[in-house]
């Protein structure tokens, strides 16, 4: 299943971080394989606990798509922040993931013997179903809907 957890926006990082003990929310009998989106980001502020992803689950896959090093390098003090972030990211991924899927080769090296580059993203069936349901509701769009997006280097676009 898909699990949602509470988070808090931290202005200094320009990011939302978990405030719940996510692992504590998952029953042990359901902990077989975990697929973590942005595992390095997800674990920067891990709660104090003896349970970690790789100790609770039989197999943990991390999917990484944001180049946080590009963000930090562009910030004030980036020359000092970026090497620290590089090391922290590697620690987080090595500690929490058995396998790493990077969406682009432009992303940093996290776990050299455990990572591959593969575009595993796409439009998920759940999102298509939600769109179909919304299209049949009383609040449906009167005309066709389109999406404007952009490809960002920070998100792994080569």
Image (cartoon, rainbow, N blue to C red):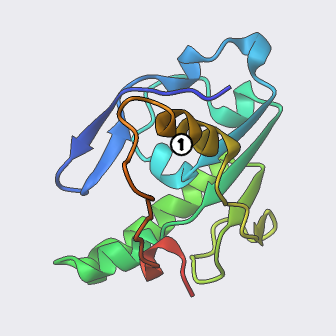
Instruction: Tell me: 95 left or right of 16.
Output: right
Quarter of the figure that contains the N terminus: top right
Classify residue 51 by image quadrant. Answer: top right
Is residue 12 shown left or right of residue 26? left
**10 Å neighbourhood of mark 1: few (<14), some, or many (≥20)?**
few
Quadrant where the C terminus is found in the figure: bottom right
- The outermost residue toward the bottom is 158
Q: Is residue 123 above or below residue 69?
A: above
Residue at the image point whose x is 55% and y is 36% from the top: 130
The front one of 50 and 139 is: 139
What residue is at 67 percent from the left and 60 percent from the top? 121
Residue nearer the viewer, 98 or 4: 4
- Relative to 64, is 116 on the left or the right? right
Number of labels in the image equals 1
Which structural element holds mark 1? helix
* Residue 90: quarter of image: bottom right
Residue under the image location 21 percent in, 76 percent down: 75
The correct choice, above or below, for 120 with respect to 51 in the image is below
Percent from the top left, x then y, of residue 139?
A: 35, 34
Q: Residue at x 47, y 36 (%)?
A: 134
Quarter of the image for residue 117 reads bottom right
Report the residue marked by disc 1.
131
Q: Residue 52 in the image: x percent, y percent?
A: 62, 31
Name the residue nearer the viewer: 15 or 49: 15
- Image coordinates of residue 53 in percent, x first then y, are 66, 34
């Amino acid at each position: 299943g898909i699990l949602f957890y509470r988070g808090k926006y931290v202005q200094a990082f320009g990011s939302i971080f978990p405030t719940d003990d996510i692992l504590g929310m998952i029953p042990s009998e359901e902990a077989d394989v975990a697929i973590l989106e942005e595992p390095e980001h997800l674990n920067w502020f891990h709660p104090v606990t003896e349970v970690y992803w790789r100790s609770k689950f039989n197999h943990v896959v991390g999917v990484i798509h944001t180049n946080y090093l590009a963000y930090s390098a562009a910030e004030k003090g980036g020359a000092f922040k970026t090497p620290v972030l590089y090391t922290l990211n590697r620690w987080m991924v090595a500690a929490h993931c058995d396998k790493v899927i990077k969406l682009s080769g432009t992303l940093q090296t996290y776990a050299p013997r455990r990572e591959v580059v593969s575009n595993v993203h796409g439009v998920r069936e759940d999102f298509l179903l939600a769109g179909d349901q919304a299209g049949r509701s009383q609040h449906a769009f009167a005309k066709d809907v389109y999406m404007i997006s952009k490809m960002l280097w920070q998100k792994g676009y080569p």
